Image: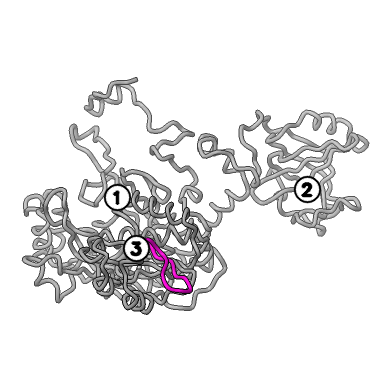
């Protein structure tokens, strides 16, 4: 071995030992001719000393060392001189007096600081990701990701699961986002798709008799990017046979609590609350509610009808939220503008004062109506009520976003306060306004609730699926369901969303054929691994826990992908490009 110890390993017990340490130069200091270098690897820092009175030749070589040079230093461990002990450093009691130096490689001056306290801009970090990854805190994020992955595997292995890899080159099937496609050289004109998820393959594995499967699956989706999305991400994917919805939820909840303890050290004893889709929309205006704060939506439609404020009395629904903060008029105006930019026609408000409500619209509300409003909302003095009047869908969307916006402005969101919940009883279908037809709300393989199968043909809006979403702090971590295992029922669901028997056969006939040979009751979940680790580390941006992420244009600034390929490759793939190069 080229080293006997890592840079984070040496301590007082090693004093007097001959050691070899290797790493990158973090800092170099010249104190009266004696050179001190902090040598860094992923384990920590060790101070190495070049003293001309000890070894003049080695000291002379050290005079030309710069930041990020890679060194191997051999010497004896000694106690640091009095007054130079660094109690904040694990190796701070000792240093290595160097007898032999090898400069493995020299380095240019790095374009970014290899310091946790200095943050480069996003573009520079992504372009020089190999330098960014040298920073201790960034390395620790990936080490924590590794620990989390091992914890997931250990938990699921303990519960009888088998890790099975599914293909990366697959048939294109409807998953909800655009596929990345790969041309086949040996089958001209035909294409593979990269998997958006292993959905069909894990169902096939259940039919094959592997009753407990999992993998940390790579999922690739050609979609517009944002903080919690990347072209490729990792999913904790699992499937179980002969289970009911609660069985899957209970197992995943246990795994999630185990992960939380591994990553944060926190133990969560309480069961995750379970909200129906209707309850979540009604109370929080979202099917992924943030439960770290209250400010629930309050339906005041019936109370408002007793007022003379026509904007409210003619509306299909009126709801409000109560913000316990004495906003200034400028702050209220700013929130009104924010609401309009986020889908509201307007945002009415009333402030609770000692004498009642204060607002330009109070004159339309009699004393009796004001009293009823106070009783309904339980608003305290100094609070502000914000109202949205519109169709229920608009009311929910606007107020759902507004409660989070206000919580952000009031600094109510502690990133290390972890509030999980399950959302269940989702609609099986949703109406596609653009195409004028019914489509699936999650994916077309969801088992309907048994008592709702009767609604599929003529009242699809009433049909609910055996669906369950896992939510953490207002972010959807994963979506799961019990799957259809009956070919006739699968055909009925596909027919309702406009997929003919011929189209179904063409797109996923292999699954429909497999059903014919005996399919167990089965269900599972796809659960965002990057997202979970990021949130538990206090980030909203999943790129912080991905080694080589893409930017918002799905580009890797480090390696230059996506890139052109040469004409020879295109000919071999039987592809012609009609893109005009700039």
Residue name at image x 81 percent, y 30 percent: 63
Q: CA distance from mark 1 to mark 2?
A: 50 Å
Of tags 2 and 3, the one toward the viewer is 3
Residue 351 pos. (x, y %): 43, 66
Given residues 157 and 492, the one toward you in this image is 492
Which one is nearer the viewer's eye here, 269 or 416? 416
Ranked by sequence position, the earlier of labels 1 and 2 is: 2
Q: Do we see residue 157 in this rendering?
A: no
> What is the number of the mark on residue 361?
3
Residue depth check, mark 3 versus mark 1: number of the one nearer the observer: 3
Q: Which range of residues does the magenta coloring cover?
A: 349-360
In the picture, which quadrant includes the C terminus?
A: top left
Asked if residue 229 can be seen in this view, the reply is yes
Circle 1: is it few (<14), some (14-19), or many (20+) Cα within 10 Å?
many
| Residue bearing the label numbered 2 | 19
In the picture, residue 368 is in which quadrant?
bottom left
Residue that numbered label 1 is attached to: 196
Q: How many marks?
A: 3
Please tell me the numbered disc located at residue 302: none
Q: CA distance from mark 3 to mark 1?
A: 51 Å
Q: CA distance from mark 2 to mark 3?
A: 79 Å
Q: Mark 1 or mark 2: which is in front?
A: 1
Which class describes the residues within 10 Å of circle 3: few (<14), some (14-19), or many (20+)?
few
Say if mark 1 contacts mark 2, CB within 8 Å: no
On screen, residue 309 above or below 336:
below
Q: Is residue 250 magenta?
A: no
Majority secondary structure of magenta residues: strand
Q: Return the disc, 3 or 1, that comes first in the chain's sequence.
A: 1
Decide whether residue 357 is among the magenta residues. Answer: yes
Compared across the picture, whether 70 is left or right of 326 comes to right
């Amino acid at each position: 071995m080229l080293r006997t110890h890592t840079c984070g390993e040496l301590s007082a017990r090693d004093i007097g030992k001959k050691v070899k340490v290797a790493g990158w130069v973090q800092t170099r200091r010249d104190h009266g001719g004696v050179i001190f270098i902090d040598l860094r690897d992923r384990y920590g820092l060790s101070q190495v000393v070049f003293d001309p009175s000890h070894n003049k030749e080695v000291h002379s070589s050290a005079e030309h060392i710069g930041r990020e040079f890679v060194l191997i230093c051999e010497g004896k461990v000694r106690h640091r001189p009095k007054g130079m002990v660094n109690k904040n450093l694990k190796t701070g009691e000792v240093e290595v007096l160097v007898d032999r130096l090898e400069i493995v490689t020299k380095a240019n001056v790095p374009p970014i600081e290899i310091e946790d306290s200095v943050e480069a801009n996003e573009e520079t970090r992504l372009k020089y990701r190999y330098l960014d990854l040298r920073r201790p805190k960034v390395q620790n994020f990936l080490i924590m990701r590794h620990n989390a992955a091992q914890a997931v595997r250990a938990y699921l292995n303990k519960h009888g699961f088998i890790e099975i890899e599914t293909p990366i080159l697959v048939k294109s099937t409807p998953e909800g986002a655009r596929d990345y496609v790969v041309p086949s050289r040996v089958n001209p004109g035909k294409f593979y798709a990269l998997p958006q998820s292993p959905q069909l393959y894990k169902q096939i594995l259940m039919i094959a008799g592997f009753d407990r499967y999992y993998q940390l699956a790579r999922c690739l989706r050609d979609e517009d990017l944002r903080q919690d999305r990347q072209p490729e991400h990792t999913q904790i994917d699992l499937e179980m046979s002969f289970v009911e919805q609660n069985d899957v939820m209970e197992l995943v909840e246990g795994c999630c609590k185990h992960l939380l303890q591994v990553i944060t050290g926190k133990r969560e004893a309480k069961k995750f609350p379970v909200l129906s889709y209707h309850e979540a929309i009604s109370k929080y205006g979202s099917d992924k509610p943030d439960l770290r704060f209250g400010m629930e939506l309050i339906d005041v439609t019936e109370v408002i009808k007793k007022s003379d404020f026509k904007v409210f009395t003619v509306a299909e629904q009126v709801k409000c939220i109560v913000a316990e903060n004495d906003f200034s008029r400028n702050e209220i105006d700013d929130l009104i503008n924010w609401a309009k930019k986020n889908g509201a026609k307007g945002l009415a408000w009333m402030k609770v004062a000692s004498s009642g409500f204060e607002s330009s619209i109070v004159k339309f509300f009699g004393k009796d109506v004001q009293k009823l409003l106070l009783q309904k909302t339980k608003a305290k003095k100094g609070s502000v009520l914000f109202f949205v009047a519109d169709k229920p869908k608009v009311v929910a969307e606007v107020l759902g976003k507004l409660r989070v916006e206000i919580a952000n402005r009031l600094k109510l969101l502690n990133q290390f306060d972890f509030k999980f919940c399950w959302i269940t009883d989702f609609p099986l279908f949703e109406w596609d306004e653009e195409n004028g037809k019914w489509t699936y709300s999650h994916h077309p393989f969801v088992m309907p609730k048994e008592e709702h199968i009767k609604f599929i043909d003529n009242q699809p809006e009433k049909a609910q699926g055996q669906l369950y979403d896992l939510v953490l702090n207002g972010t959807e971590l994963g979506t799961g369901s019990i799957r259809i295992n009956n070919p006739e029922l699968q055909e009925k669901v596909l027919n309702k969303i406009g997929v003919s028997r011929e189209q179904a056969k063409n797109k996923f006939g292999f699954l429909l054929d497999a059903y014919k040979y005996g399919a167990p009751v089965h269900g599972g979940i796809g659960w965002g691994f990057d997202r979970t680790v990021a949130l538990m580390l206090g980030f909203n941006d999943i790129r912080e826990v991905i080694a080589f992420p893409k930017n918002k244009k799905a580009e890797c600034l480090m390696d230059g992908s996506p890139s052109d390929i040469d004409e020879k490759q295109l000919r071999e793939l039987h592809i012609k490009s009609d893109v005009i190069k700039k």
